[in-house]
Amino acid sequence: MNLTLKIWRQKDAASQGSIVDYQVKGIEGDMSFLEMLDVLNEQLITKGDDPVVFDHDCREGICGACSLQINGEPHGPDRLVTTCQLHMRKFNDGDTIYIEPFRAKAFPVVKDLMVDRSSFDRIQQAGGYVSVNTSGNTIDANAIPVNKDDADESFEAATCIGCGACVAACKNASAMLFTSAKVSQFALLPQGQVEATDRVLAMVNQMDEEGFGNCTNTGACEIECPKGISLENIARMNREYLKASLKG
Amino acid sequence: MGGLIKSSIARKVAMALSGLFLVFFLLQHFTINFTSIFSADVFNELSHFMGTNPLVQFALQPVLIFGVVFHFVMGFVLELKNRNARAVKYAKYSGGANASWVSRNMIYSGLVILAFLGLHFYDFWIPEMVHKYVEFAPEDPTRYYPELLHRFESPVRTGLYVVSFVFLALHLWHGFASSFQSVGFNNKYSVAATKFAKAFSIIIPLGFIVIAIILHLTH
């Protein structure tokens, strides 16, 4: 199939960017979206132009590196997939596709479609861990009984790959779904209780300091999340936060 | 506790709680208005009580006004902060693909309701305040129903009220159910609570519309 691509090009963080049109030919339906961009970049390099810069790593939907706002939706029109898992068969010959970086003040553009998502790392560093010494004295996980439902919910929260689609989809650029998943995965387990109060306060505080917007419960994040992280996590974080604020 | 003041979650909870408070007020207002379509005497009696009871006038009324002002001001503050969180807008943004129009445009339905409140205050609250606390006019317990009918004489005013109630329904459709999530209420009762909130958001504004039309036709 032949496509018209409208891609955001930006030289660096300090420069003004703009949408540039490209024609790309010979795209197969079995290609992933990133492979389609590889084809475009080969065309550009052959012509002596700068290739389009975009984030990618594992290309199998588990690392959270790929991003891209495709036709107005993070990771494109498909559900529960990352951009690297998005197949070109979802598009039609002759389509025009808008490709933009994830937009948020807390995700500044580095170059073209690549954004700096280290604000997520800083939220995680603020409290998304358990201070248990695991070097040389690891305790069998089964030694601490955990309710099966809690274990499942915790696991589901922990499947968040931190790609930032929730922020990109949210009309307010809110990071509540990401932060709540990282809070929930510990809040549901006995191992997470020791630091529960400090964790939620520190992570929410960091989230606010990074300049993310406020959640207005539109639910866009849950729909666009490639891992299907549930809004229940946000309600849980709200409870945890209120509990911690009143306690601390 | 200090961080609670500037925290995004605290602001969200404050919006939810003030919204829930206004929902309770709406129900109370609807109940009194509803009596007007079947008994002028009951409406007069209730209005007289609300208009003269010191607890209502000097305790509940200021709390209500604070609740309304707080909800609007906080709504605007959050909207500005949220717009600022995405300085560069998308060239193409498919908001409708993952969220309802109502949930994405609460600020606009809220602005219509704010404009309506201006009209409503001009029609009822300001004349009432002038009557009682400026002119110190003698109290007539039977004046309320005729005054109400008089206000709904105009088809334009009745139409404006009807349109405003439609926007109130839209605002409640997202806001009421959303407030449960904001205060952390998400459990096995959530589905039933959401259904109740959605039903409320249709039935109460529809009731206000029916009352406005009946009063207009009665005149």
Image: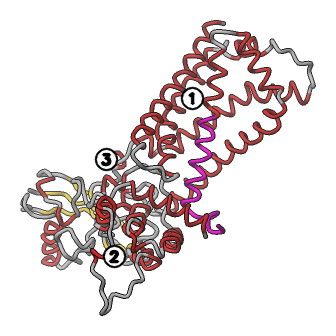
Q: CA distance from mark 2 to mark 1?
A: 47 Å
Residue at horizontal 20 percent and vertical 68 percent from the top = A61
Q: Are marks 1 and 3 on the same chain?
A: yes
Q: Residues within 10 Å of mark 1 (few under 14, many from 20)?
A: many
Disc 1: host chain:
B
Q: Is residue A69 visible to us here? A: no
Q: Using the rendered view, name the quadrant where residue B116 is placed.
A: top right
Q: Is residue A198 magenta?
A: no
**Residue type pointed to by label 3:** Ala
Q: Secondary structure at mark 3?
A: helix
Q: CA distance from mark 1 to mark 3?
A: 27 Å
Q: Are marks 2 and 1 on the same chain?
A: no
Q: Nearer the viewer, residue A3 or B93?
A: B93
Q: Picture coordinates of residue B169 (x, y %)?
A: 51, 31
**Circles 2 and 1 in contact, beta carbons < 8 Å:** no
**Circles 1 and 3 in contact, beta carbons < 8 Å:** no
Q: Secondary structure at mark 2?
A: strand
**Camera-nearest label, 3 or 2:** 3
The label shown at residue B97 is: 3
Residue at horizontal 34 percent and vertical 61 percent from the top = A150
Q: Secondary structure at mark 1?
A: helix
What segment carries the magenta color? B1-24
Q: Picture coordinates of residue A151 (x, y %)?
A: 31, 64
**Residue type pointed to by label 1:** Ser
Q: Residues within 10 Å of mark 2 (few under 14, many from 20)?
A: many
The label shown at residue A111 is: 2
Q: Of all residues shown, which one is farthest toward the top? A: B218
The label shown at residue B164 is: 1
Residue at horizontal 48 percent and vertical 28 percent from the top = B202
